[in-house]
Image (tube, coloured by chain):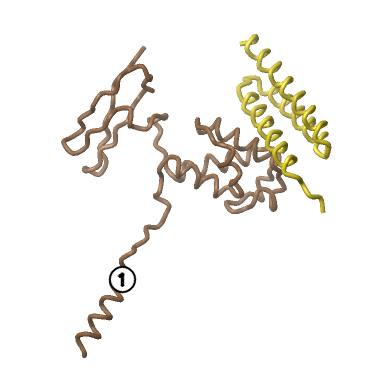
Amino acid sequence: MKQLSLKHFIIRSQAIALYRDIMRTLLKIQDQDYRKEMRDWARIEFNRHRTLKDLGEIRTQIALGRRNLNELKLSMQMAS
Amino acid sequence: MLSTTIRLLMRSGTLIRPIITTVRPLSIKPTLINFNEKRKTLINEIPRRWSHVHYTYPMIESRVMLLLRLFDKIDPNSLKLDSKFVQDLGLDSLDIVEITAALEDEFWTEIADVDSDHFLTPRHIIQYLCDKYDIYEHIEPVSAGKEYLEEAKAAADRAHHH
């Protein structure tokens, strides 16, 4: 039985907060096809790294996700 | 353009429910509205939402269930009020985050992380929204006095017969 440490639990809540920010941002996209595509992409990315155990790798992925989210927000601002 | 019109709706003759047609910006100082002598309310105390829509329990329930049925990872045939998201419907925490974001969008409100952790069934979601909008018409009123009255009556009978 895998035991999650406290640090893992904290990082897990950070990852979920990132996913929530992504979802909230995606809901602002008007184009339904683009929104669906982005949402599927986010799901695939999160599910691919679901079984990571090393805290450093997890932090790297979360930082990458944040960077992608900021780029997405910028492109949405420029498009509107 | 600022509009300060307020329409009053008379319900059952004694209850007056004020309805704001537009959202009032914060820059306007609150003014005292005199509906009648007994009910003076500050206009800023009236909950600000799309008040031309009247929130009721059936409306909230149908909206939440529709939203869940439209979710592509949920099988609409197996969705019940009490079906658990994780155990029965096979969702995981990321899906619940997605559902919460869609609920926030649908109901024009913010739902905190701590609250969405407690969403285990659709019934929990509906109850949370009812609490948020002060809807309690679906809850049976609890009479705290019934048992006490019976006991008091029994005690009085006993005292009478002694």
Q: Residue A33: where, in percent of width, then height?
A: 70, 23
The residue drawn where x is 69% and y is 52% is: B88
Quickly name the residue at label 1. Answer: B148
In this view, the residue farthest toward the front is: A6
Q: Colour of chain A?
A: yellow
- Crowding at dot 1, Cα within 10 Å, few <14 / some 14-19 / many 20+, comes out as few
| Element carrying mark 1 | helix
Q: Residue B56: horizontal and vertical position, in percent?
A: 42, 42
Q: Quadrant of the C terminus of chain A?
A: top right
Compared to residue B128, the image places residue B109 above or below, namely: above
> Residue at left 43%, top 40%?
B133
Judged left or right of residue B57, residue B69 is right
Q: Amino acid at mark 1?
A: Tyr
The quarter of the picture where residue A10 lies is top right
User: Vertical placement of B155 versus A40: above or below?
Assistant: below
Instruction: State whether residue B157 is above or below residue B93.
Output: below
Give B154 or B107, whichever is nearer the viewer: B154
Q: Chain of mark 1?
A: B
Query: Which residue is most to the top?
Result: A78
Q: Position of residue B31 (x, y in %)?
A: 25, 23
Identify the image quadrant of the N terminus of chain A: bottom right
Residue appearing at x 65%, y 35% in the figure: B98
Of all chains in the rendering, the one displayed in brown is B
- Image position, residue A52 (x, y; %): 83, 37
Q: Residue drawn at (71%, 27%), measured in percent from left and top?
A: A36
Res. B147 image quadrant:
bottom left
